[in-house]
Image: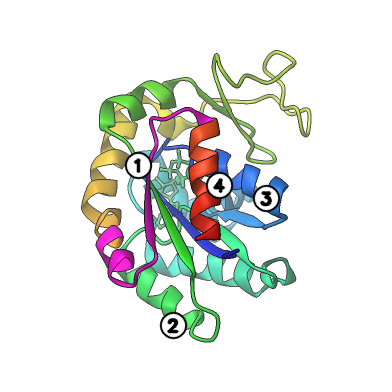
Amino acid sequence: MRRRVILLGPPGSGKGTVAVHLQKELGLPHVSSGHLLRREVENGSTMGRRAKLFIDKGELVPNDAVLELVNSWLLSSDAEEGFVLDGFPRNLAQAKVLDEWLRQTPIEKVILFDSPESVIVDRITGRRTCPKCGRVYQLPTLAPSKDGVCDDCGTMVVQREDDQEPVVRKRYDIYRRETEPLAAYYRQQGKLTVVDATRPLEQRLSAATAALRG
Ligand code: ATP
Ligand code: MG
């Protein structure tokens, strides 16, 4: 079983949901760079205040800030037995730095969840996120069991500012321009599996688990 994994894909392609399942089934810790950044924003740190300017516009946060956050997560003991990265790397520069960090224990598998823009926009408008623990819900199919309240921590779920349609479209454009080229980068390394993100969750999960076995 391959255990150092990257989940790639446009915003709202279900990377976070798959990551949570992999964590439950395989005990693999996962981290979402978006969640790390939003936590900084919540805390009102200097980095968080700077990052917010980019996040709200749907633009990528500058590499130095993202690299610092992901690096300290990777160095934490959580990541020793393997990990799933969701939302990182987002451009070629980040991917190259990651390869440098992991020279002794390289990334084993990259799963790309591909989806057309129309599906992304539909999905993201139904998305609700727990601002405290980061858990993601999807109305109406994967709603919290108690109306509007996170199943895990009891916090009121919200619609993210950057989940409004115009911002989603911009995030999708930036994904195509900056992030999608990583597919070729990892394909060349022989690590890439592409999964159709428009399939039902069950099928995406089994495709992801099969890829990690292969
Ligand atoms: P989804 O969570 O639906 O997959 P997403 O991937 O666009 O959508 P996040 O990963 O939560 O959303 O990221 C939200 C925002 O945080 C991004 O639009 C960007 O501004 C910033 N961000 C997250 N990860 C990175 C990164 N690796 N590099 C630069 N900016 C990032
Ligand atoms: Mg995400």
- Return the x and y of residue 204 as percentages of the image width and height: 48, 38
**What percent of the width, then of the height, locates residue 97?**
41, 76
Q: Nearer the viewer, mark 3 or mark 1?
A: 3
The residue to which callout 1 is attached is 58
Q: Which residue is mark 2?
A: 100
In the rendered structure, which amino acid carries the disc numbered 4? Arg
Per the image, is 154 magenta?
Answer: no
Give whichever of 93, 132 is nearer the camera. Answer: 93
Pointer 4 with pointer 3, Cβ within 8 A = no
Name which residue type carries label 1: Gly
* Pointer 4 or 2: first along the chain: 4
Determine whether the residue tagged by mark 1 lies in a helix, strand or loop. loop
Badge 3 marks a residue whose secondary structure is helix
Viewer-nearest residue: 49 or 24: 24
Report how far apart the C-alphas of labels 3 and 1 lie in the structure. 27 Å
- Cα distance between the residues tagged 3 and 2: 25 Å
The span from disc 1 to disc 4 (Cα, nearest Å) is 13 Å
Q: Residue at x 35, y 53 (%)?
A: 60
Q: Which residue is label 3 attached to?
A: 23
The residue type indicated by label 3 comes to Gln
Which badge, 1 or 4, is on the more N-terminal residue? 4
Cα separation between marks 4 and 3: 21 Å
Alpha carbons under labels 4 and 2: distance apart: 26 Å
Kindly identify which numbered label has been placed on residue 38.
Answer: 4
- Front position among marks 1 and 2: 2
Answer above or below: position of 37 versus 189: above
Q: How is the image coloured?
A: rainbow
Earlier residue among tags 3 and 2 = 3
> Is residue 198 highlighted in magenta?
yes
The part of the chain drawn in magenta is: 183-201
